[in-house]
């Protein structure tokens, strides 16, 4: 019986740890990409138009790329609490 309870406790602790680390992956807050708010962003977003205007209201750094799908040259970064405009930006990435 002790082995069963111990195994159940280990499984419960593992599931709890997985659930808490998964939800911590997205950035907290929002980015405003050419006037469109993206809440709790995570990953790559293509800009709907050029120039690309980024307002970073998250706790993570946003990286701006020159091509769609976060490829090509890195055009710059927008630090948390800052905004910037990139004439040749096509996509943004946030961890």
Image (cartoon, rainbow, N blue to C red):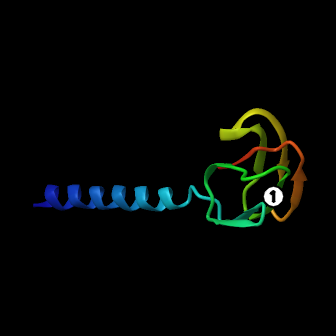
Residue located beneath label 1 in the image: 54
Q: Is residue 90 above or below residue 24?
A: above
The x, y position of residue 9, in whole percent, is 27, 61
Q: Which residue is rendered at x = 85% and y = 51% of the image?
A: 51
Q: Quadrant of residue 88?
A: top right
Residue 13 lies in quadrant: bottom left
**Residue 3: x, y in percent?**
15, 55
Along the viewing direction, whichever of 24 and 85 lies nearer the viewer: 85
Percent of width and height locating residue 27: 64, 60
Count of all numbered marks drawn on residues in the image: 1
Residue placed at 69% from the left, 39% from the top? 68
Dot 1 falls on a residue whose secondary structure is strand
Asked whether residue 79 appears in the rendered view, the answer is no
Q: If the image is split into quadrants, where does the N terminus sit?
A: bottom left
> Residue placed farthest to the top in the image?
72
The answer to whether 48 appears left or right of 26 in the picture is right
């Amino acid at each position: 019986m002790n082995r069963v309870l111990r195994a159940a406790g280990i499984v419960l602790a593992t599931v709890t740890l997985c659930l808490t680390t998964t939800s911590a992956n997205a950035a907290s807050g929002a980015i405003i990409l050419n006037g469109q708010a993206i809440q709790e962003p995570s990953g790559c977003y293509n800009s709907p138009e050029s120039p690309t205007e980024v307002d970073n209201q998250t706790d993570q750094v946003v990286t701006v790329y020159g091509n769609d799908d976060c490829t090509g040259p890195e055009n710059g970064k927008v630090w948390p609490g800052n905004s910037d405009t990139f004439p040749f930006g096509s996509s943004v990435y946030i961890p």
